[in-house]
Amino acid sequence: MSNAVSVLNGASFTGLAEVKDAGLVGMITLRGDLASKSLAKAVKECTGCAIPGIRKVTQADGTTVVWMSPDELLIVTAYQDVDAKVDALSTALTGAHALVVNVSDARAMFTVSGSGAREVLAKVAPVDFAADQFVPGGFRRTRLAQVAGAFWLDTDACFNIVCFRSVGQYVFDLLTTSADANAEVGVY
């Protein structure tokens, strides 16, 4: 059996902002009725997090729950905890119309942090990154140039980016090009 590795095995780049491969990250897709009390209870018991509002994230004890669509959440947790959380959620949702899937090895995650993080992302995604518009806890599912991606803001300067693993190298290269010290625009 092979050892699990992240998409770029810890690669990083520092320029206008720091771009890093987040390493092995556990990710669970949960589809179901987000207004359901049984689903909310299962998520809270398994993660410590409430169901986030539209385009929001909630966080507790190293786990993040991300609103992905009206019937989908992404649960981001420690890689080694995924199987236990999938089992717990599946058991808690027995009989409910829900889908719980470990997607950890199908996704890649990067962080973009530092004073230039907003500018780096603004060059590649059609989102208003002004500090009063994209605030901590905010989330978007959109395009990163030519590919699908999603991101949320943990603090005023650290964005978490998720994409399909198959385009991980492209996204890293895109972000590092945008973060090049000679590519400053000065919008944010």
Image (spheres, helix red, strand yellow):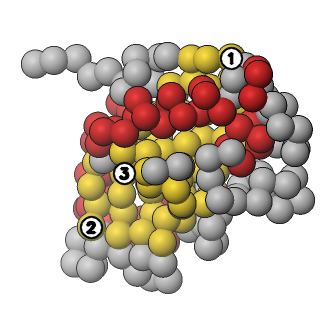
Q: Nearer the viewer, residue 4 or 82?
A: 4
Precedes in sequence: disc 3 or disc 1: 1
Q: Amino acid at mark 1?
A: Thr
- Where does residue 134 sit, x and y in percent of width and height? 78, 57
Residue 48 shows in this picture: no
Real-space Cα distance between discs 3 and 2?
10 Å
Residue 98 shows in this picture: yes
- In this rendering, position of residue 161 left or right of residue 100: right
- Closer to viewer: mark 1 or mark 2: 1
Precedes in sequence: disc 3 or disc 2: 3
Residue 85's disc is none
- Where does residue 184 sit, x and y in percent of width and height? 81, 31
Image point 45% across, 82% down: which residue?
36
- Where does residue 71 sit, x and y in percent of width and height? 42, 76
**Element at badge 2?**
strand
Category of crowding for the residue at label 1, using alpha-carbon neighbours closer than 10 angstroms: few (below 14), some (14–19), many (at least 20): some
Position of the C terminus, as image quadrant, is: top right
Question: Is disc 1 in contact with disc 2, using a CB cutoff of under 8 Å?
Answer: no
**Element at badge 1?**
strand
- Closer to viewer: mark 3 or mark 1: 1
Position of the N terminus, as image quadrant, is: top left
Residue beneath disc 1: 14
Image point 53% across, 49% down: which residue?
145
Real-space Cα distance between discs 3 and 1?
30 Å
Q: Amino acid at mark 3?
A: Ile
Q: Amino acid at mark 2?
A: Leu
Q: Nearer the viewer, residue 98 or 21?
A: 21
Category of crowding for the residue at label 2, using alpha-carbon neighbours closer than 10 angstroms: few (below 14), some (14–19), many (at least 20): some
Residue 28's disc is 3
